[in-house]
Image (cartoon, rainbow, N blue to C red):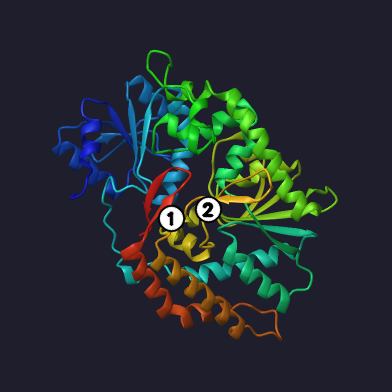
């Protein structure tokens, strides 16, 4: 294996580690680590708990503690990495086991048979999802469907075209400003939620996390020392009182935004649906708490997370767990669907949004805007307004837009590094 971060190699020396994942990439990584004299104690897998693979024993999470393993490396495709991380993060924190997730990082080079030209064409999938969404919503009696910014941008645009031209009994669409950042700070008005959001991946110091995720000013942040705090998590939780004070302010500002713009959403008389692209349900869970009402979720794909509040959410998704491989390059789908404006941070005392500095390169932003505009024009031109049969619409639009999409993919290959603001991490799209 050619590309393995020297910093990662140094980090793993003299540590007992395990790998979560038993794919072909795992074999390459095992060989590379062996060349560096780093021994992997065992492998973990979500479906197998015994036996051996690549001459390494499969172990359980409990056995990682029994074997004094201090580090687990997650080796899986992007969507699966997030599922695995959510599955094991609480266990690992409680047992002082570090997780190295390769999400968005160039720690290992994963070989792929796909060339740039062979990447999934997500235009067809995008349109298929909107058709699936309209079909499901037409069977219910919702007053509104909330399309969460920024991922809901193109889905709402296509939904509005279909609603106007074909469906008269679909709920009114609302482009609803939200993000993991504003949800996290607005919902962190209790210790449980602060603990939950502290466990999300973040590249940076605990002081930076308190400033970035919980909006604390420098003068409110203590100094982290090993002598005073058991670990970084203990240090973060020592700021609970200050975080709750901040959260209450931002929570009221967020509610003020809703009251000023969409007061009917707060009424329990109105049934409300919410759209998300690919999610474990973080925004839906937080918005239910902030708005004090139930929301029904409709997702392109729902990622499972072993968290009681999320398990109780009412969510329906088009793509099930067995079909997640279609989302191998889901950052491409995300860029295709999202608004190119910056990510929302919070609402200020005037109940107006405050955004983070833009992270999409200008040339890529221009390419996304052009592609989105052309997709919408193509849908309107291809739509048979005399029929509600949409069977061929997605494929027809994809075929017409294929050359434009390929140009977009080639642009991603050159300028396709974006910033995940919530985890403070640069992410390679393809």
Instruction: Look at 23% across and 37% down and name the residue there.
Output: 7
| Viewer-nearest residue: 18 or 366 | 366
State whether residue 141 appears in this view. yes
Q: Which mark is residue 359?
A: 1
Toward which corner of the image does residue 141 lie, by quadrant? bottom right
Q: Which mark is residue 189?
A: none
User: Residue 220: percent from the left, percent from the top?
Assistant: 52, 26
> Label 2, on which residue?
343
Toward which corner of the image does residue 21 lie, by quadrant? top left
Q: In which quadrant of the rendered image does the C terminus lie?
A: bottom left
In the rendered view, would you say 65 is above or below 89?
A: above
Residues at badges 1 and 2 in contact (C-beta under 8 Å)? yes
Instruction: Look at 47% across and 55% down and name the residue there.
Output: 324
Name the side, left or right, on which 261 lies relative to 421: right
Q: How many marks?
A: 2
Name the side, left or right, on which 129 lies relative to 91: right
| Viewer-nearest residue: 54 or 77 | 77
Q: Secondary structure at mark 1?
A: loop
């Amino acid at each position: 294996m050619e590309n393995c971060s020297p910093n990662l190699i140094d980090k793993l020396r003299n540590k007992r580690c395990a790998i979560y994942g038993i794919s072909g990439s795992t074999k390459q990584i095992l060989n590379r680590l062996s060349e560096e004299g780093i021994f992997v104690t065992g492998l973990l897998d979500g479906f197998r708990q015994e036996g051996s693979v690549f001459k390494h024993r499969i172990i359980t999470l409990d056995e990682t503690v029994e074997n004094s393993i201090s580090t687990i490396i997650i080796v899986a495709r992007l969507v699966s990495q997030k599922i695995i991380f959510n599955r094991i993060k609480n266990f690992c924190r409680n047992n002082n086991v570090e997780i190295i997730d390769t999400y968005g990082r160039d720690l290992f080079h994963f070989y792929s048979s796909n060339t740039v030209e062979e990447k999934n064409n997500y235009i067809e999938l995008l349109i298929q999802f909107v058709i699936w969404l309209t079909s499901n919503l037409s069977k219910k009696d919702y007053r509104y469907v909330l399309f969460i910014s920024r991922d809901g941008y193109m889905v709402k645009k296509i939904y509005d075209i279909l609603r106007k031209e074909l469906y008269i009994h679909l709920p009114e669409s609302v482009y609803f400003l939200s993000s993991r950042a504003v949800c996290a700070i607005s919902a962190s008005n209790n210790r449980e939620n602060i603990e939950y959001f502290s466990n999300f991946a973040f590249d940076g110091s605990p002081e930076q996390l308190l400033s970035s995720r919980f909006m604390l000013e420098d003068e409110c942040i203590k100094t982290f020392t090993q002598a005073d705090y058991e670990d970084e998590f203990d240090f973060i939780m020592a700021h609970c009182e200050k975080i709750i004070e901040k959260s209450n302010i931002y929570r009221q500002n967020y509610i003020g935004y809703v009251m000023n713009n969409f007061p009917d959403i707060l009424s329990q008389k109105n049934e409300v649906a919410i759209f998300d692209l690919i999610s474990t349900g973080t925004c839906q869970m937080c918005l239910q708490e902030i708005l004090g009402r139930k929301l029904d979720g409709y997702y392109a794909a729902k990622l499972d997370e072993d968290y009681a509040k999320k398990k109780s959410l009412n969510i329906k998704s088009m793509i099930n767990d067995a079909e997640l491989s279609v989302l191998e390059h889901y950052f491409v789908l995300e860029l295709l669907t999202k608004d190119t404006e910056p990510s929302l941070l919070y609402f200020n005392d005037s109940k107006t949004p405050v955004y983070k500095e833009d992270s999409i390169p200008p040339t890529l932003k221009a390419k996304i805007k052009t592609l989105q505009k052309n997709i919408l024009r193509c849908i309107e031109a291809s739509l048979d307004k005399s029929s509600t049969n949409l069977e061929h619409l997605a494929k027809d639009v994809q075929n017409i837009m294929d050359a434009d999409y390929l140009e977009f993919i080639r642009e991603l290959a050159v300028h396709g590094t974006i910033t995940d603001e919530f985890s403070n991490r640069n992410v390679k799209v393809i």
